[in-house]
Structures are given as structure tokens and as C-alpha cells.
Amino acid sequence: MKKVLYPGTFDPVTYGHIDIIKRAVNLFDEVIVTVAVNPTKNQLFSTAERVMMLKESLNNYERVSVDSFDGLVVEHAKQVGATGIIRGLRQISDFEFEFQMALMNRKLAGDITTIFLMPHEKYTYLNSTVIRNLASLHADVSDFVPPNVHEALKKKF
Ligand code: ADP
């Protein structure tokens, strides 16, 4: 039973994240999407809201679950019995940070492997910050986020 963790801020979840989750489900038995409780990042949605939006967006994926964690990703991976950490790579600019983090996580927990997946090209320029900015200016973001997230953004702004 191959279980992997997909950690991130998901503020909010986009079709780019969901593309990565779909690819991970095709490769592994179980995918746990885990929302990082990160007080240093300025977040639009609370942890509970981010978890709820992910759950609503992923409710027809049987082998996907959603939780949250506060602390080290590798510790959370061990706690839930995951042997891999999934990360999305959109472009070269993601690489340096992701490479450093993957090596540090390997140093902390040598038996947990980071796996990088690439989304469809149409999502490579998409991130949650862009979505928050567009939504705050009342732009239509329905091509980039699931309908429940679109509604939640409309309510926020
Ligand atoms: P962001 O604020 O950049 O969306 P997250 O912390 O929510 O960042 O991202 C979690 C993981 O999902 C990271 O590995 C990130 O590279 C990846 N990711 C974010 N957006 C996309 C996308 N559009 N396509 C593929 N992977 C993505």
C-alpha cells in the first residue's frame, strides 16, 4: 500500500493542485493532501476553510483524503505512514527552492522520498497568489479554480 503526502498552503486550492493530485492518484494507492498551518505566511483563508474547500473539491476521489499539520512535513509523513512527499514543479524558477527542501527533508528523514510531478502546461503559470490577486480585483477566475472555491472567493471580496 503506497501512501504519499501532498503538502502545501492551498490558499486556495486551484486546478493546478488538482492536476497534480490526479497524477499522484494514478501512481499511488493513497494520497493525503495536507494543509500547512503556517503562521508566517499571510493567508486569505483559515486552515479550516482551506481544508473544507479541498474536501469539497476532491469528494469524488476515493483514495484521496485531506488533513492539516503544524510542524515538520517529514514528521507528519511518518505519523500517517506515507513514504513519499509529492511536490508540483511548474517551471525552472520552482526548482531551486524545491530542490533545497527535498534535500533537507531527505537529510531529516532518509526513508521518505520527494517526488516531483509536472502539471499540464495550461497550469504552469497558475499559483494561489495570482488567484487571490485576480479575485480581489473581481476578475473571473472560474477557469482556474473549482466552483466552490470561486464562490468562496466571491464572498471574501
Ligand atoms: P502556491 O501558493 O504556489 O500555489 P502551495 O504551497 O499551495 O503553493 O503549493 C503546494 C505544492 O503545489 C507545491 O509543490 C507547488 O509547487 C505545487 N503547485 C502549486 N500550484 C501549482 C500548479 N499550478 N501546478 C502544479 N503544481 C502546483
Image (cartoon, helix red, strand yellow):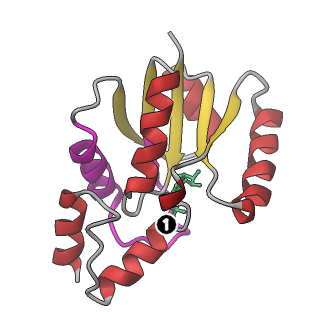
Q: Is residue 120 above or below residue 72?
A: below
Residue 33 in view of the camera: no
Q: What segment carries the magenta color? A: 33-59
Name the spot of residue 26 as percent of width and height, x first: 46, 25
Identify which residue is drawn at 58% across, 38% down.
86
Mark yes or no: residue 104 visible. Answer: yes
Secondary structure under badge 1? loop
> Is 44 included in the stretch rendered in magenta?
yes
Residue type, numbered disc 1: Leu
Residue position for label 1:
126
What residue sits 56% from the left and 69% below the top? 40
Residue at image coords 80%, 43%:
104
Q: Quadrant of the C terminus?
A: bottom left
Left or right: where 78 falls relative to 60 = right
Asked if residue 69 is positioned above or below residue 3 in the image, the reply reads below
The one nearer the camera, 110 or 26, is 26
Judge: label 1 CB < 8 Å from ligand 1.
yes
82 or 108, nearer to the observer: 82
Magenta residue check for 24: no
Category of crowding for the residue at label 1, using alpha-carbon neighbours closer than 10 angstroms: few (below 14), some (14–19), many (at least 20): some
